Image (cartoon, rainbow, N blue to C red):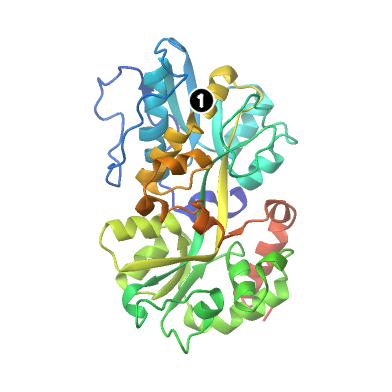
Amino acid sequence: MERLSRRRLFGAGAAGLALFTAACGDDDDPESTPTPSFDPSGTPVGFIPGYEDPARWSGRTLRVAAWGGEVQEALRLMVWEPFARATGCTIQEQTTDYAFLRSSRDDGAVYADALIVDAEFAATAFDQGLAQAIPGEIAADLLPRSDHSVPAYAYAMVNAFRRDAVDPPTMPPETWADWWDAATFPGARTLFKGAFGSFEFALLADGVERDALYPLDFDRAIASLRTISGRIIDRWWESGLQPVSWLNSSRAEFASAWHYRVIAGQSEGQPVELVWNQGLLVTDHWIVPPNAENADIAVDFIAYASRAEVQAGLARLIALGPVTSEAFDLLDPLELAKLPTAPSNLATLVPQDVAWWVANRGAAEERFNSWLLGVAG
């Protein structure tokens, strides 16, 4: 989300462009692929029907861009490297940068062949001349796709808390109204320092029904935030890494947080839990720029990344939600419980209204910031 600073919101640790090159059989440089910051215990993607020709794209290079950090590490292990082995192409890794994408459109330079972008950017990319049509049948059937973008994975901003802040632990704050109830659930809170998510949760806490959430009522959201801000004080998180870290250190007892970071904390033994109910469902998307040098490989690559086997492997590794329904047949119940798009979890989430945010992001963020700075009282 360019308007919010994508790395600020998600805490992605991007490390510049051209991070590494993955090629079929190319393992001469052991330092070219960084060690993941998680335990890569997921089953590596093996044979995928239709991808049995290791010379298919031999001698060709595909430039792929994503957001960096542990998500990019997981994509590298579960998507890029297996695709390179299966087709013989070389993958040159980039970091998604909207300014670079726009400048490449304007000057005709080639920046990337396939990029992961946020849903708001994907919704307007074609009209801005930043994306071309993606033809063919692609397996991503769980979430809406357009002619020029394909969902890559899903994630959710959820209600998270320290296990010892709830007594008994089997009775957590099940709704945002509960989360706002400091008498029943005493303790320090943290929310994202921005309108995104914070406005939705404030309105849900104030009794707005999920089906009536959009358009967001700024005044009502601010009034609701005002009632809980005394429990937040200086704990407005700005990086996606912060809320789970603060829960772990007891700087806060209750938080909004990205679901996969809570699950990563649990895998490290941290005393953190999450509630799916009323979480905000978000997606990232693949696009192919109009001046992509290897658009044919890019379309094939996106189709590969959307296959059930690949989506399931990514879900095992970092708990990103599959966008292909057949992926769930390859996952066990414990794995499914960690995923936002698993049917039982998806039914409880609130999808981000992308069209509303495209039209109103500037006004929403200005309203939030003016309140937080005390301008609006």
Left or right side of 218 for 101: left
Number of numbered labels in the structure image: 1
Task: Give me the residue at 65% from left, 39% from top.
Answer: 145
Between 46 and 344, the one lying in front of the other is 344
Query: What residue do we see at 42% from left, 31% from top?
Result: 79
223 vs 325, nearest the viewer:
325
| Residue 280 percent coordinates (x, y) | 56, 60
Q: Residue at x 27, y 39 (%)?
A: 35
- Please indicate whether residue 129 sits to the left or right of residue 299 in the image: right
Q: Residues within 10 Å of mark 1 (few under 14, many from 20)?
A: many
Please say whether residue 232 is visible from this viewpoint: yes
Q: Position of residue 113 (x, y in %)?
A: 55, 25
Secondary structure at numbered mark 1:
helix
Q: Nearer the viewer, residue 301 or 330?
A: 330
Above or below, 123 against 61 in this view is below
Can you give x and y, in whole percent of width and height, for residue 208 in the image? Answer: 68, 74
Q: Residue furthest bottom?
A: 183
Res 197 → quadrant: bottom right
Residue at x-position 49% and y-position 32%: 307
Between 194 and 347, the one lying in front of the other is: 347
Q: In this picture, is 370 found above or below 102?
A: below
Amino acid type of the residue tagged 1 in the rendering: Phe
Residue 72 appears anywhere in the view? no
Left or right placement of residue 11 versus residue 362 in this view: left
Q: Position of residue 207 (x, y in %)?
A: 65, 78
In the rendered image, the quadrant that contains the C terminus is bottom right
* Quarter holding residue 248: bottom left
Circle 1 residue: 301
